[in-house]
Amino acid sequence: MPDLRWGLTLPFPGLTLADHVPLFRQAEAAGFDDLWTGETTGPDGFTPLALAAGVTERVRLATGVVNPYTRGIPVLAQTSAAIQDASRGRFVLGIGSSSNVIVERWNEVPFVKPLSRVRDAVQALRPLLTPSDPPGRGPGGFKLETQPATAVPIVIAALRDRMLRMAAAEGDGAFTNFLPLGGLPHVVEQVRAGEAEAGKAPGSVELVCRFFCIPQPADEALPLARFMFAAYGTVPVYAEFFRSLGWADQLDPMVDAWKAGDRKLALERAPDDLIREIFIFGSPEEQRERLARFADGGITTFVLTPITAPDDLPRMIDALAAAR
């Protein structure tokens, strides 16, 4: 099994990127192994890592995740190779299909055949991001002017069965998100199936999961968690994920209200039982106990997202380090 790794999600909301620098250093000093970016409506997935590369020495720097619809293969290869160079070999490319909202609604790119699009992108990027003689080539004969000195690992974002199996077969890891504890055995089963299909040893593929950590008792934090969950749980790719795990009856009333434009009713219908299975609430001790259950179930890399005010981030980074 891969060793357990502990990371943080970048960027931290409410801070300029320049103000992240001392927090990058603090996270590394506190013992975190990784920094993983998100990419929605804030900074892009690469710039925070480029900034972190210059002020850290040990932590792994990973996109969590970028997509092959809004960036072509040469651009993904160039940016990945550049950060691998800047970080002296600490970069991981996390790649996934994203969602119809980000790809099609916001960027006006057709969101079609996500599994094929991601698989094809990974297969095209491998030769470009792995040193070889002669250098590997991508679409149209493209090759990097300078190959990375060391191969860039590729982790594939996955929620549902076929993508999970493909991530395990084609990638160095699988990255999942908003995972209910009760759904973990099924996700691990699909990852193991993908490993078997590719002839990999069981448990050899890294299994990454992002966790949303709120330092309040669950009952106090539920209003905020409902708001966050409704924004994600109503996106079609996430709604289908939760339905596939058996939550359709609890989820669909919320989704119906959201589609009808009634955000207030959607929040009221957000399924608290599911939210409690996903979010990490409470004191560092309570969070440690909860995260340990995910580790026991097969998660190997924990990407922790602190949900707190900007001026509380230094305290919470140390608290989350203590919860590892």
Image: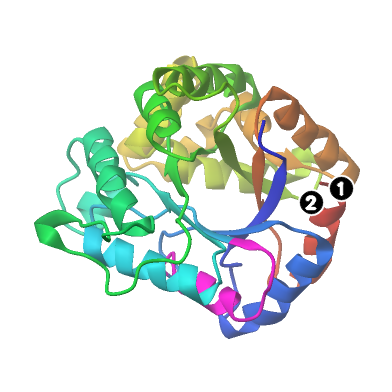
Query: Which contiguous range is marked in magenta?
Result: 44-60
Q: Name the residue that disc number 2 marks.
A: 215
Which residue sits furthest front? Answer: 133
Q: Is residue 51 magenta?
A: yes
Q: Name the residue that disc number 1 marks.
A: 284
* Coordinates of residue 322 in the picture (x, y in percent): 87, 52
Q: Is residue 202 left or right of residue 239?
A: right
* Of the image marks 2 and 1, the number of the one nearer the N terminus: 2
Identity of the residue drawn at 56% across and 27% down = 271
SS of the residue at dot 1? Answer: helix
**Amino acid tagged 2:** Pro
* Coordinates of residue 16 in the picture (x, y in percent): 56, 81
**Amino acid tagged 1:** Pro
Q: Is residue 204 magenta?
A: no
* Coordinates of residue 46 in the picture (x, y in percent): 44, 68
Whether label 2 touches label 1, CB < 8 Å: yes
